[in-house]
Amino acid sequence: MPAYLESLTLRLASGLETLLDDTRDRHAGFLKTFQQPDGGFRGREGGSDLYYTGFALRGLALLGHLQGEVADRAAGYLRSQLSRQVPMVDFLSLIYGAALLDFAAGIDVFDGGAGGWQQNIARALEAFRRDDGGYAKTDEGAASSMYHTFLVVLSQQLIQQPVIEPDHIVAFVHSRQRDDGGFVEMPQMKRSGTNPTAAAIGLLRILDALDESTRESTLDFLVEMQTDEGGLRANTRIPIADLLSTFTGCLTLADLNALGEIDVPAVHRYAKQLEQPEGGFLGAVWDQVPDVEYTFYGLGTIALAANAE
């Protein structure tokens, strides 16, 4: 697995080492209930989905349960999806899921595939490139997306292909920073968000282009995102914290060596508040149904808090 995602997986897994075995087993058991007959995992409804399969595999890997039959069946599902044309976010889920299965279970999803597929994928990704240096959500999208630019760069790492014109990507990232220190997803936006800010800092770190001025301004923005609940909110217009923003915000603060600038015990309490007795996590206090995506964010948030304490 490439440096960024391998490092993240190991960091989070180490933060969960103090979990009791029954807690670990409870959350792993919850995730496994979402596996479908074809080996994939579903969301809150419907059948197998690459996006949710990716989150289920990430959660199981953190808990040390990505092995045996559950891994074999998941590999079969991913192999069945290799010939499909899928959105970028699903493509990353497929590639990352395959990397996790190789890393955790020694299963090569691409074994026996045609040679040169990595180069073919890298060329296909360039259809999403836009003049501002970023990548659009689709090959017909008019504007670059911060999130999808991050996905493309992660995908390039996962398939072991070089990042194309990294200086242009860095310039694109800086063009999306706003006066409050955060970053926006699309060019017309004026109000920064926690999640596009996380993608922006992730890109700058991968490209070794994070300067001290950007670090300080981003830190100021993220500190303001913590609410009285203990979690982080998506932007200043939203008064309520959510687990996605809490995880991405805390991860970014940790990457900036500044997680201690917010109330970390309060973050931990917030995540534990959303933990369910039967396993899994809710997305926020208003949520009613746990799922695989927010379970990964919950586990990841607890891991980050544990690493900081």
Image: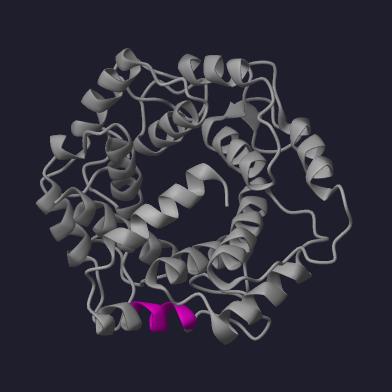
Left-right relation of 44 to 11: right
Q: Which residue is located at x 43 percent, y 27 percent?
A: 184
Q: In which quarter of the image is residue 250?
A: top left
Q: Measured along the vertical axis of the image, is residue 248 above or below residue 123?
A: below
Tell me how the rendering is colored.
one colour
Camera-side residue of 56 and 182: 56
Res. 283 in view = no
Q: Which residue is located at x 29 percent, y 84 percent?
A: 278
Residue 48 is situated, as x and y percent measured from the top left of the image, at 63, 73
**Numbered range of the magenta stretch:** 27-32
Res. 184 in view = yes
Residue 258 is situated, as x and y percent measured from the top left of the image, at 21, 33
Is 68 a magenta residue?
no
Residue 125 is situated, as x and y percent measured from the top left of the image, at 74, 37
Residue 105 is situated, as x and y percent measured from the top left of the image, at 57, 73
Q: Measured along the vertical axis of the image, is residue 13 above or below residue 134?
A: below
Q: Quadrant of residue 205?
A: top left
Camera-side residue of 304 and 1: 1
Q: Measured along the vertical axis of the image, is residue 136 above or below residue 131?
A: below
Left-right relation of 125 to 56: right
Q: Which residue is located at x 67 percent, y 20 percent?
A: 165
Left-right relation of 192 to 99: left
The secondary structure that most of the magenta stretch takes on is helix
Camera-side residue of 274 and 53: 53
Left-right relation of 111 to 148: right
Q: Which residue is located at x 44 percent, y 62 percent?
A: 293
